[in-house]
Image: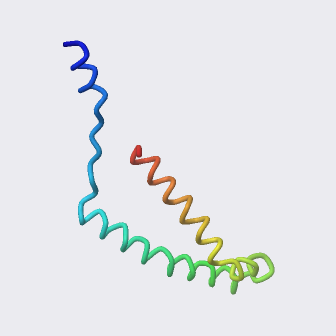
Amino acid sequence: MISSNAITSQTSFHVKPSIFDLVAQDSMSELILPSFRKIIHYLSTKNPEKYGWVSKWADECFLGFNVIVQRFCLVQCGV
């Protein structure tokens, strides 16, 4: 009796994402990159001495930004 309760209490339920979650994540990824590039373009034209290097390293900066955002989302969802 005790061993059967221990087995059922240790079982974890993983909810699979729905199709709507997958579509929302895909559209978010498609929207973030162009907006990030617009922000970089604006910053590099507004103050090229300070932010000129960012336009050269835009893809790497976006990779870092994307990692931070996805890590935040994973921590918030408790995965």
The picture places residue 60, in percent across and down from the top left corner, at: 65, 72
Asked which colour scheme the image uses, the reply is rainbow
Count of all numbered marks drawn on residues in the image: 0
The residue lying at 75 percent from left, 78 percent from top is 53
Q: Residue furthest bottom?
A: 45
Which quadrant would residue 39 be assigned to in this image? bottom right
Q: Nearer the viewer, residue 52 or 14?
A: 14
Q: Can you say whether 8 is above or below 21 in the image?
A: above
- Within the image, what quadrant is residue 47 found in? bottom right
With respect to residue 68, does 10 lie above or below?
A: above
Q: Is residue 20 above or below residue 9?
A: below
Identify the residue at horizontal 21%, vertical 20% (top origin). 4
| The N terminus, quarter of image | top left
What residue is shown at x 62% (from left), y 83% (from top)? 42
**Residue at 24% from the left image edge and 65% from the top image edge:** 19
Residue closer to the observer: 12 or 23: 12
Q: Quadrant of residue 52?
A: bottom right
